[in-house]
Amino acid sequence: MLKKILNLINKYRQPPISYARSLGVSIGENCKIAIKNWGSEPYLITLGNHVHITTNVQFINHDGGVWVFRDEIPDFDVFGKIVIGDNSYIGNNAVIMPGVSIGKNCVIGANSVVTKSIPDNMVVAGVPAKYICTTEEYKVKMMKIIIPLKKKSGQQKKKFLIKMPSNAFIIKDALK
């Protein structure tokens, strides 16, 4: 019980990357991590360099569905490693399933469930995640509406964005 309490305290005191490494997550250089929940087998997760993990991303390294066989086979368990390649971005609330490898230069859309491995240079999204475009195609599309505000203060950003015309923002097509 004391160990659980100390682990909980440690979880909230340490920065996310330090905490993840203390659990056994292998993390490359220049990563940005916004989570502290790494699932039940964090030591089976590897992140490359310059990987961004946003809020509420979940990593699942086992198949809990084998529970239905435990009366027959009490030790039934299966696991899968998860590997995220260099320079990849995992959007809010994405779920990465066991055995998945995500290539280099990939974008995983928010709320996606990644059930299959993703090759390099792809943008995927959905439930289950499906191919949307290449990262190069995504860059070309986004360059048309780029708004260079990263070095501005919150107030400067707000003032600028409020004055922008509506057609300068991301606009989604209607469902058909």
Image: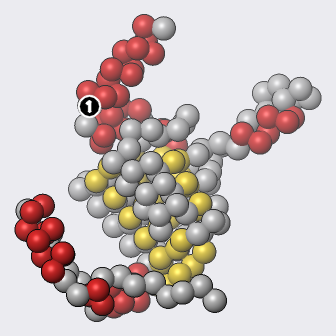
Q: Is residue 175 left or right of residue 5?
A: right
Q: Is residue 156 above or below residue 138?
A: above
Depth order, front residue of 41/156: 156
Give x and y (percent) for residue 38. Answer: 47, 40
Considering every residue shown, the one lying at the far right of the view is 72
Depth order, front residue of 102/58: 58
Residue 156 lies in what quarter of the image? bottom left
Give x and y (percent) for residue 8. Answer: 39, 22
Which image quarter holds the C terminus? bottom right
Query: Residue drawn at (55%, 34%), measured in percent from left and top?
Result: 40
Q: Is residue 110 above or below residue 15?
A: below
Q: Is residue 34 left or right of residue 107?
A: left
Query: Residue drawn at (29%, 86%), measured in percent from left and top?
Result: 166
Give the residue number, with chain letter if any, for mark 1.
14
Q: Is residue 19 above or below residue 2?
A: below
Depth order, front residue of 172/11: 172
Q: Is residue 49 visible?
A: no
Q: Is residue 7 visible?
A: yes
Q: Is residue 77 left or right of residue 4?
A: right
What amino acid is labelled 1 in the image?
Gln
Q: Is residue 135 above or below residue 111?
A: below
Within-10-Å neighbours for mark 1: few <14, some 14–19, many 20+: few
Give x and y (percent) for residue 76. Answer: 79, 33
Q: How is the image coloured?
A: secondary structure
Query: Residue drawn at (55%, 63%), measured in percent from left and top?
Result: 112
Please, what secondary structure does the residue beneath circle 1 have? loop
